[in-house]
Image (spheres, coloured by chain):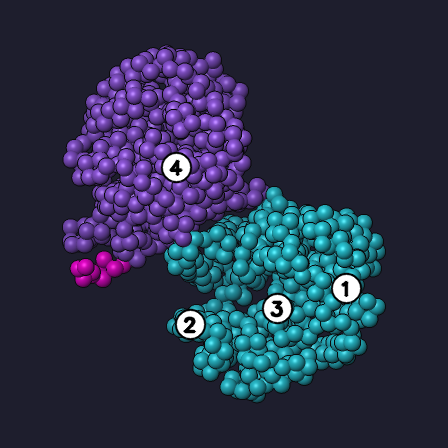
Chain colours: A purple, B cyan
Amino acid sequence: MTQITKTEKDFLQLLREQSAYQEAINLAQWDARTKLPKKGASQRAEMVGFLSEKLHQLQTSEKIAYFIDALSDKTTDTVIRRSLEECKEVYERNKKIPHDEFKEYVTLQSKSEAVWQEAREKDDFALFQPYLEKLVAYNKRFADYWGYEDNIYDALLHHYEPGVTTKTLDNVFPKLKTALTELLKDIKTQDAEKDNILIHSFPKDKQRAFSIEILKKMGFNFDAGRLDDTVHPFAIGINKNDVRITTRYDEMDFRMAVFGIIHEGGHALYEQNISDALLHTPLASGTSMGIHESQSLFWEIFIARSKAFWEANYDLFQTYAPDYFNGISLSEFYEAVNQVKPSLIRIEADELTYSLHIMLRYELEKALLNDAIKVKDLPNIWNEKIHDYLGIVPKNNRDGVLQDIHWAGGDFGYFPSYSLGYMYAAQFEHAMKKQMNLEDVIRSGDFSPIMNWLKENIHQYGMMKKPMEILQDVTGEGLNPDYLVQHLRTKFLTM
Amino acid sequence: MTQITKTEKDFLQLLREQSAYQEAINLAQWDARTKLPKKGASQRAEMVGFLSEKLHQLQTSEKIAYFIDALSDKTTDTVIRRSLEECKEVYERNKKIPHDEFKEYVTLQSKSEAVWQEAREKDDFALFQPYLEKLVAYNKRFADYWGYEDNIYDALLHHYEPGVTTKTLDNVFPKLKTALTELLKDIKTQDAEKDNILIHSFPKDKQRAFSIEILKKMGFNFDAGRLDDTVHPFAIGINKNDVRITTRYDEMDFRMAVFGIIHEGGHALYEQNISDALLHTPLASGTSMGIHESQSLFWEIFIARSKAFWEANYDLFQTYAPDYFNGISLSEFYEAVNQVKPSLIRIEADELTYSLHIMLRYELEKALLNDAIKVKDLPNIWNEKIHDYLGIVPKNNRDGVLQDIHWAGGDFGYFPSYSLGYMYAAQFEHAMKKQMNLEDVIRSGDFSPIMNWLKENIHQYGMMKKPMEILQDVTGEGLNPDYLVQHLRTKFLTM
């Protein structure tokens, strides 16, 4: 390691302080969603608000501006250089929005979430409409402050997936749409209810025990992580030595917890395997929403829903599952956990139709930001599009345009990450297969070659590499939907 | 409420910030002792250290000095006035110690704890001796910085139990010692092993379920609190709406968890019942170590080890306990959970001998601080004293002078709080009995009159009243050991 200067040392100290705040915030949020007693909610929100404000002050301080200015061109340390870039990005992003405007927006966000909840319960889009209009207007203004080259929507996309633009998406989504809708037609003749055989009582503690065995096989380190219960599952890294997974259980449908835990476990492995060299810097985290999602989907979809996985683990599953499951053959089981069925709700969608839900949202967001459609017309346009994509129409807005919380929280530009995660994961799988016989590895029951490959090629870098850099370095090419299409065709046309 | 000024408002805002830091620290510490994965320990220590430093900076800032100066004589708001006093106390306490000296001391503390652990394992006092000598020397210097009237030890006592001095203790402890040692002689002829009948397997989850029923009866609000597992049990208030109890289980001896949970539950009720008016101020906490301990002991000893309690709850206990306990009569059970037996280890002592352990430590601490004895002579003096008090002598220093962590952490002046807690609790019980037939209430199974009395007379005030003020207001007199002696005599001479 190069000798670092006094200024670099001071900068690293400031990064440590930022990390400490971020860790305290993450712990408080994990606790709020897993352990916090009901009455503690309002004071907890205040505590998190206070710590977030302190972190924000550091991120936009004169001191950080000084370091960015003094060090960016001088430092020879690569971690410090990337950290400076990241700090600059956050600094400018925050500084470009007038403070009062941002405060108004934060208030609008929390109000809108409450109104959205009510609108959803009452199936009353008109209630939510004026809030959504304001949220779109703010996001347009923010995007203008932040700046963009081609399309206003790019300024929002950048926040979640730097390097990906509307141009990128408009290049891949239509191909993907065509391929997926065609594939869907080809397999639609299948029995659409064959997963009914999975609906059977399966005690929570047994689901948990089986999932823990799988997590351990995946390489999740319980000395550096936990598994807890929650209502809306998530994974969160407090730091790489303390990464927490959460899940919820449906005792009549083990898929929710078992595949949910494997999914969150994929996120967690990413965080646990970041290089020690990035500790206490803003780089000690997954590099983007999309790459993070690729890691959870890689394990959930490409490993845990594969035939080889169940060939290797169905016996183990049976030791935890009630006797009822003895009556289900491996191939029946495999087909049932891979049931494809167009449905109205994104979060319940299968791996084939999921991306169609995303494309619909992307088109609407882009159109809203570009004034191509009006908020008040959203319900109708939503219903037309979902019919176009999936051949079904919701009976109400609750199962349509009102189903997701994202817009109510002002999160425009986030949805594409999910679909990017699928495409990245398929590209990574393809690259991995060049170096190992993946099916044989999965079948062997020893996942360490997979884990090591992911660690080596993706995890260790944290935010040292941008998403497109990771993709290029690992696969030798840019975003390419063909691998996902190929994976889905191979899988579903031979089932 | 009186109209508050701009300056008062700013001061309250600063208190809110202090509270937010304190809550984040308390949450992080609770988590570290209940949930934190092993590998997360070192980064957690750093996070807590950072937040503590930030809190310390606020507590000793020019800003707080300004408020103390500007408001102390002017404010008409009683909560603000008491908060200013508390802030001033903390400010001066911290400011009086030179910063470098305090930093050296913090380093010494953590080193000493590690050395103490090793010395204890190896039963090697000589290893710990030089550290203990330094710790005593620092505490003497700090006491000089802080100042005192009569005895140097008072400066330390003040930190844990403001208003209590060596004079106070020298006035009550000899009386208590005589009464307890005499009582001990009178009952020593009893069968010293009658609690052996309690040693029997009792599954953890059943112990937990029974304890939760009792906690609920006590009035512990699970919407504003939790119960978790730990290694060294404690209770911690993050704020009054989020108060957490911890315990550990011995499946061969239910007493550890059941009485432990009731004990921590007593601490927790105190925190849950502090007035809302004190929220976000430094007053929203128990007023002293001793008063806090009086609340835990009140429930553990005066309620849960009473005959009436088991008359009311033995049937309930039996519904959770293994069948084996059916064979133990109520009176056998009652006598067994009240077994008195002189023993070497303080934390295992019964309610009668516990205070004798404390007095021994008090005498040694006072003598050390006053140069009346030398650290190197501690093992011998300890053994002489424990023989004097309890008629037994430890075979090694591990069960003698090396048993407690307190001195290794530099906590001199803390031990008396435990014994004060016993005396306060007995005085409170006496006062309570003037207003209700306590036995009848306990026997009724509805503890709400007890909880309401404690809330009304003690809990609600938080730190608005000093310990001696609470005692005087509730009992009409100062510290008086007679009630504890009377309680013990009545209980053990009629058993």
Task: State which region is magenta.
Answer: A1-10
Looking at the picture, tell me which residue is in the foreground, A73 or B281.
A73
Q: Which residue is mark 4?
A: A313
Label 1 secondary element:
helix
| Circle 4/circle 1 CB separation < 8 Å | no
Say which chain tag 1 marks: B
Say which chain tag 3 marks: B
Up-down: is B199 above or below A254? below
Residue under the point 58% across and 42% down? A39
Q: Which residue is mark 3?
A: B347
Q: Is residue B403 visible?
A: yes
Q: Which residue is mark 2?
A: B111
Q: Residue B335's mark?
A: 1
Say which chain tag 2 marks: B
Looking at the picture, tell me which residue is in the foreground, A257 or B369.
A257
Alpha-carbon distance for marks 4 and 1? 55 Å
Which amino acid, by three-letter code, is at mark 2? Answer: Lys
Looking at the picture, tell me which residue is in the foreground, A479 or B453.
A479
N-term mark: 2 or 1:
2
Dot 2 surroundings within 10 Å: few (below 14), some, or many (20 or more)? some
